[in-house]
Amino acid sequence: MADPLAAPGPARLQLGYWLSSEEHPPADLVRWARRAEEAGFSSAAISDHYHPWTARQGQAPFVWTVLGTIASATQRLSIGTAVTAPMIRLHPAVVAHAAATAACLLPGRFFLGVGSGERLNEHILGTHWPEPRVRLEMLEEAVAIIRRLFDGEMVSHHGAHFTVETARLFTRPESPPPIYLAAGGRRSAEVAARIGDGLIGVAPNPRHVEAFEAAGGRGKPRLGQVHVCWADTEADARRIAHEWWPNGALSGPLLTELPQPRDVEQAARLVRLEDVARVVACGPDPEVHLAAIARFAAAGFSVLYVHQVGPDQEGFFRFYERDVLPALTIASPTSRGGAPT
Amino acid sequence: MSPRAAWRLRSLGFTKVYDYVPGKADWMAAGLPTEGPKASVPRITQVARSEVPRCRPDETVGELRDRIGDWELGVVVNDGGVVLGTVRAEVLGLDDARPVADVMQEGPVTFRPNLGLSDLAAHLRKRGVPRVLVTRSDGTLIGLVLLEDIPQPSQGDSADG
């Protein structure tokens, strides 16, 4: 298995860029991926949504098409899904097909990030939305199917949740891409350690990382998402973050159980400017951004994806190139530390 | 020796009796030698890595970088060696001037050296904790125990208190 995020030695920090499918049209996502590579980010993660969280965000392109175009627009950038739910909207055999093709187009620089999904994206086929425990079971079964298909097996599977009949992938990469699992609690972190090649977390919670490590995940990549909003002033940044990412201040069932953007918008009406500012590092002060990154590093995350909330990505890139990236000692293809291979 | 045992021995006529006032548990927790049937029970000090890197909270990430090597974390201690927290190796990717105090995890779980290995392993697995610090009863560091360093219990092993 070629793991693009495996650290070249002891645990060290890598900085990646978050491609927010909910906020950007597909052509812009490709443009920002290329720009991230140029700026010195070692990798990128792209979200997979059928709907944005709110209508203001306004976008949700098909992630696999975008990934194919990013493959031809970049040379070094590692990239993967964060995360796709290979269960309801997309059957695991289909996700395996898509991911194997993406891995062929991104040799040695693709990872498959998976999770148990949100109703917002997965309800569209009218299928029952299962409770969290069942979704985690489904994810385990799905990952097992995907791995067998990645290995080139002819797969027939009649499981508790999925059926696959005589399926075989003819287009496969030389070695299967790593599969990272999203986890928001101890139980899912343990599953991630047991069946995954890495952990994806959204909060700087050291307990989740420790549960992952105790269950066998030591030495595997731990990916985290850091929300930031650069703007000329802190006040502008807070206003933009509140306008574009109010869902950042929601948690738990409000994110996993609501079916439509308008439902999330209704919940987000209760979110105040200061609530968003607590989860999004806002403004033009590099120290604010470095401190947000430091919280995830201190919790044991090894690859941090910086999500610039709102439309001004170019301003963010210039700010990071000038004021943030030079302060760090990250492993990156174009900065100090060498390639993360 | 506990006060009760000391009194009993004196009442039996022994004259050279030393009462360790803090008590037996404290004696054992300090890692001092013991005798008796349970003295051979494997204790966590046997696998504690005393060479784990240490630093002070007022040191910087840059200063820690030279010391931490291949370790996954360092232990933050005060001048007296009392454990204040831990710091992950991932912070070495941050800006050199950042104080360790900014990026340490405070209040780490610690155990005393008299704890049996099998008890510790059961606790760590149950709680999902990959590593713990071993400290003396005064809070000073003895070493780091990794879950993977603890031998898997064989059938017949019993809890040893």
Image: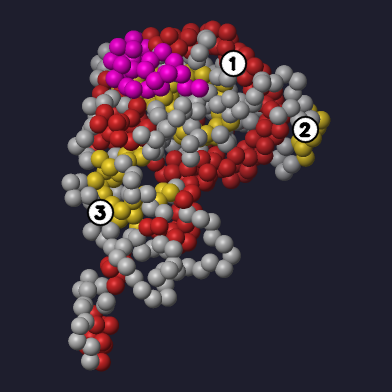
Q: Secondary structure at mark 3?
A: loop
Q: Secondary structure at mark 1?
A: loop
Nearest to the eye among marks 3 and 2: give it: 3
Q: Is residue A222 visible?
A: yes
Q: Horizontal and vertical percent for residue B94?
A: 31, 26
Q: Does A71 appear above or below B19? A: above
**Disc 1 + disc 2, Cβ < 8 Å:** no
Viewport quadrant of the C terminus of chain B: bottom left
Circles 1 and 2 on the same chain: yes
Residue A329 on the magenta segment: yes
What residue is disc 1 on?
Answer: A106
Q: Horizontal and vertical percent for residue A45?
A: 50, 22
What residue is disc 3 on?
Answer: B140
Q: Horizontal and vertical percent for residue A113?
A: 56, 28
Circle 3 Cα neighbour tier, 10 Å, few/some/many (<14 / 14–19 / ≥20): some
- The residue at the far bottom in this view is B12
Q: Does A208 appear above or below B134? A: above
Circle 2 Cα neighbour tier, 10 Å, few/some/many (<14 / 14–19 / ≥20): some
Q: Amino acid at mark 3?
A: Thr
What residue is disc 2 on?
Answer: A155
Foreground pick, A157 / A26: A157
Q: From the viewer's perspective, is A322 left or right of A168? A: left
Circle 1 Cα neighbour tier, 10 Å, few/some/many (<14 / 14–19 / ≥20): many
Chain on which label 3 sits: B
Q: Does A283 appear above or below A25? A: below
Q: Which residues are magenta?
A: A315-341
Residue B49 on the magenta segment: no
Question: Gap in Å between the C-alphas at discs 3 and 2?
Answer: 57 Å
Q: Is residue A20 visible?
A: no
Foreground pick, A59 / A15: A15
Q: Does B42 appear above or below A189? A: below
